[in-house]
Image (tube, rainbow, N blue to C red):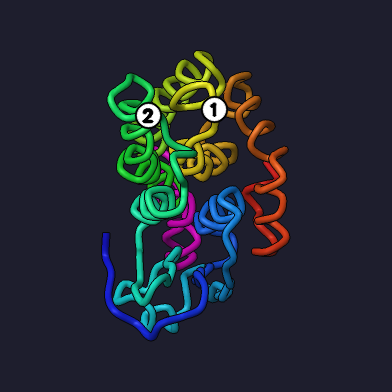
C-alpha cells in the first residue's frame, strides 16, 4: 500500500479516471454507505490518464483515494483498506476458514494474474494502428500470432477457472459478496470483450447479472458517469 501525508480533508476523495477499474472503488464505497467526493479525469486521445494525476500520485494512475490525511493507491490495497477500516466485519469472510483463503487469493489474483493477460490482449489489438501504414500488414500478422498462440489460450484457461469457481456458490469467496468479488468485477467485465467465449459461460453471466443488479453498483454508475464495461 502506498501512502503519503496530504492536507486533511472532510471525507474520502476518489480520483476517478473515466472508463477504468476505478469504478469498483465507487461501488465498494456505496456498499459501505460512506460519504465521498469524486474527482473525475478524462482520458487523452491516446486513452491514457492525464498528467494531472501525477500531482496526486507519482505514477499518475487511477484509482487513488484520499482519506484521513493520506493517499492510498492500487485497487487491491484500496479495497483492503476500506473494508478493514470501515467494513465492520462485512465484505470479507471470517479469518481462518476456506472462504477467507479464497478471499485473499482472488483479491490479489485480480491484478496479479488476470489483468496482465487482459492488458496484453488489449495492447496487441492496438499495435497495428500505432505503426506507419506500410507496416500495418506485418504488425497485424505479428499481433494476431501472439494473441492466438500465447494470450488467447491462457485467457481461455483463466475464464474456465472463473467459471468453475463461480459454479460453487455464485461468488468467488463463499456465498455472499466480498471484496474479492468487487476486485474481480473489472477483469470479468473486461473479459467480455477480450476473451473469446467468456460471455457464453453461464456462471460468469450470472455473476455479472448479480453484481450489476445491486443498488450500490447502480449508484456508483450514477456517481462516476459513463462506464463502458457495464454494457457487456
Residue occupying image coordinates x 42% and y 60%: 135
Q: Are marks 2 and 1 in contact (CB under 8 Å)?
A: no
Give the crowd class for mark 2: few <14, some 14-19, many >=20 residues within 10 Å.
few
Residue 34 in view, yes or no: yes
Q: How many marks?
A: 2
Which label was assigned to residue 176?
1
Residue at the spot of label 2: 94
Q: Secondary structure at mark 2?
A: loop
Residue occupying image coordinates x 51% and y 69%: 14
Q: Secondary structure at mark 1?
A: loop
Give the position of the C terminus as an image quadrant. top right
Question: 127 or 57, which lies in front?
Answer: 57
Tag nearer the camera, 2 or 1: 2
Give the position of the N terminus as an image quadrant. bottom left
Which image quarter: residue 189? Answer: top right
Residue occupying image coordinates x 48% and y 36%: 178
Q: Position of residue 228 (x, y in %)?
A: 66, 53
Q: Does residue 134 show up magenta in the picture?
A: yes
Q: Position of residue 127 (x, y in %)?
A: 43, 57
Residue occupying image coordinates x 47% and y 22%: 174
The magenta span reads: 124-145
Give the prevailing secondary structure in the magenta stretch. helix
CA distance for labels 2 and 1: 12 Å
Name, please, the residue furthest toward the front: 88
Amino acid at each position: 500500500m502506498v501512502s503519503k501525508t496530504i492536507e486533511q480533508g472532510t471525507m474520502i476523495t476518489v480520483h476517478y479516471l473515466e472508463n477504468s477499474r476505478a469504478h469498483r472503488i465507487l461501488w465498494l464505497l456505496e456498499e459501505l454507505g460512506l460519504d465521498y467526493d469524486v474527482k473525475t479525469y478524462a482520458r487523452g486521445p491516446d486513452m491514457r490518464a492525464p498528467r494531472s494525476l501525477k500531482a496526486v500520485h507519482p505514477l499518475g494512475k487511477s484509482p487513488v483515494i484520499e482519506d484521513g490525511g493520506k493517499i492510498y493507491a492500487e485497487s487491491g490495497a484500496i479495497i483492503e483498506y476500506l473494508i478493514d477500516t470501515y467494513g465492520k466485519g462485512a465484505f470479507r469472510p471470517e479469518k481462518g476458514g476456506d472462504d477467507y483463503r479464497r478471499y485473499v487469493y482472488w483479491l490479489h489474483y485480480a491484478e496479479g494474474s488476470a489483468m496482465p493477460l487482459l492488458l496484453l490482449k488489449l495492447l496487441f489489438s492496438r499495435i497495428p494502428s500505432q505503426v506507419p501504414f506500410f507496416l500495418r500488414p506485418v504488425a497485424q500478422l505479428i499481433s494476431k500470432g501472439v494473441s492466438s498462440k500465447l494470450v488467447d489460450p491462457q485467457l481461455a484457461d483463466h475464464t474456465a477457472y472463473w467459471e468453475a469457481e463461480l459454479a460453487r456458490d455464485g461468488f468467488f469467496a463463499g456465498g455472499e459478496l466480498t471484496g474479492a468479488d468487487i476486485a474481480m468485477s473489472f477483469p470479468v467485465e473486461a473479459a467480455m470483450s477480450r476473451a473469446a467465449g467468456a460471455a457464453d459461460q453461464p456462471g460468469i453471466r450470472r455473476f455479472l447479472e448479480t453484481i450489476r443488479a445491486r443498488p450500490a453498483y447502480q449508484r456508483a454508475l450514477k456517481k462516476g458517469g459513463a462506464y463502458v464495461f457495464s454494457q457487456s
